[in-house]
Image (cartoon, rainbow, N blue to C red):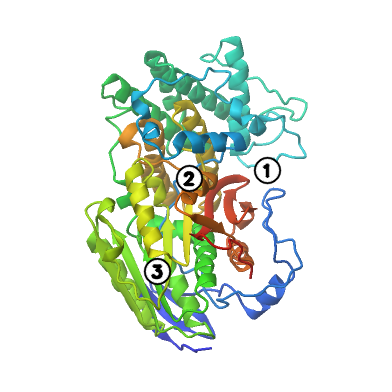
Amino acid sequence: MEMFHSDHFEFLGVSGKYDSTEGFQFEDHGREEKRNCLITNNDEREASKGIGSFYPGTLGSNQVHDSTAEKGVIYSKLHQEQQLKDLTGFACFNDPHEEEITKLADDVAFANSEFNDANKERPYAGSLQILKNYRRRFRKLSVEKMDLPSYQGCTLITGHKLSTDAILKLAAQNFIQSSSKGTTESFELSHPYASSFGGLCVEDTKDVKLVQHLLASAELVAKKQFERAGKLLLRCDKLSSDQGNTIERLVYYFSGALHERIDRETGTVTPEGLGKMQSIDILDMMSGLTSAKISMQKSVPFGQVCQFAGTQGVLDHVADATKIHIVDLEIRTGMHYTILMQALATRSQNPLEYLKVTAIGTKSKAKIEETGRQLASFAQALKLKFSINIIMVADIMDLNENLFEINADEAVAVWVEYYFMFMIRRQDMLESLMNVVKAINPRVMIVTEVEGNHNSPVFVTRFIEALFFYGAFFDSLEDCLKHDPKNRMIVESVYLSQAIRNIVATEGEERTIRQVAVNVWKAFFARFGMVQVELSMSSMYQANLVLKNFECGSSCTLNKDGKGLIIGWKGTPIHSLSAWKFGCDSTLIF
């Protein structure tokens, strides 16, 4: 194995040195902080005791439950805490009903009829039906099945402080009961689980009522009863805050999105709606590095789990190659390549001749060029031969296979990270892009996407999906960034609020965020002769091991869903990681 000693490097403003015996050491504001390597020899021996299938089990269960010995972990001395990856988490909640996923695939089929939904009349889902597809989430809860942590600073009536998810479920249950009585705008809180809980604390009581007001507002907006909805939203505004607890912050941003939707529907501008919101290019916003993104990368496990497991997926398919070419559809900060480079630098067999990256872009060429320079500097520190080629097109429709400089002896892989979801609104664009990928015929295409259903043409369905997802996401930020409230607030107000606004307030071409579940992508990719290949046990091991480096890692759940990986928060699906290739044996086991 090649040894590297005290090679200085700099990547995206982070500098330090690498030593093969001590790992990466980073210079952070004048303070040197040593980073632990991802896998040591002892870790490998420990991992061999339990590599196999993952399941969420009880809350926070990330353990592997198989005695199969680990083989084929290609990079055994990678370092993950220093990877300052771009935050890419506009995520959502997965529909638990297979028939609804199938229906979504049929309805969407990425057809034009889906994209023009704003101009169509659709049946309205009544108050008792608004949550009917989520009954599994609102089943009667028992003390044994429900996590009831004790929080300081909460004045209890009796019982314990409820989790964010439990508050949302309880509010939904009460909303259904209130709807059946025709009292959705004047709630008297009832506790349907009185036998299980002695009561609610004062804060929980307030939060449940707040969510009920929000649900009632959404229902009135769907009915186009905007005046009544506006009055109810003003109650939400008084009780919520962007600096409050998790529920208060969640309701604050959803209330703002509903205000904006009313303004759009009525053609008015109010301080709470269009007058408050600013339009931001979400794709462009995801580029570049900020302190908030760095904080997310260091403290919230989603990004690193996808990066490390996805990188292992690439390595599994190019293990015999000495010339590797990665086509990246949206390179952004390129942090995932620092992981890949470290892996290739420590590879004992088939030493690398060169690594080539082709980055595709439609804007922000200067940012891509800067990323390329930083990656080149990082590669130089590791003594790797590296090059980057940038293909800029005015429209992704202009992309074609002749623009790529691919040599016959190169092993080609395609990396897609939170990109396809922005293409769904344009069927012609997405199909054109897939035809280019097919012409390239990569060994593998690694896809990281949001695991959810934010493309429903029915507003209330989309609203509920988003509410439960962002409830989990805000909960993850509350737990993981509890020591960094400043950056948590930036993530929520700058990044997540834009996603909520886009999903809730907009329709048609303006609704650019349209996440769908991996099952839908599977049906779509099949149209181009692409099949899903199984992520290796090495990838699963990487994902599990990453979580051990996070203080809140036990709340991040890993599900082996068929051939791919679903990453969630306390059981709520957040992201999917999957591997694909064109027509061949779809089984890959290492």
Q: Quarter of the image holding residue 199? A: top right
Q: Nearer the viewer, mark 2 or mark 1?
A: 2
For marks 3 and 1, give the CA distance: 45 Å
Question: Of 118 and 144, which appears nearest the observer?
Answer: 118
For label 3, the residue is 326
Q: Earlier in the sequence, mark 2 or mark 3?
A: 2
Q: Quarter of the image holding residue 381? A: bottom left
- Amino acid carrying label 3: it is Ile
**Secondary-structure class at tag 3:** strand
Point out residue 425 in the picture as x, y percentages from the top left corner. 36, 40
Q: Earlier in the sequence, mark 2 or mark 1?
A: 2
- Amino acid carrying label 1: it is Pro
Q: Quarter of the image holding residue 142? A: top right
For marks 2 and 1, give the CA distance: 25 Å
User: Height in image: 171 above or below 428?
Assistant: above
For label 2, the residue is 91
Question: Of 390 and 245, which appears nearest the observer?
Answer: 390
Task: Please rate how many residues cluster around mark 2, counting C-alpha atoms within 10 Å: few if below 14, some from 14 to 19, many from 20.
Answer: many
Point out residue 306 in the picture as x, y percentages from the top left corner. 51, 59
For label 1, the residue is 149
Q: Nearer the viewer, mark 2 or mark 3?
A: 3
Q: Nearer the viewer, mark 3 or mark 1?
A: 3
Point out residue 62 in the picture as x, y percentages from the top left corner. 67, 57
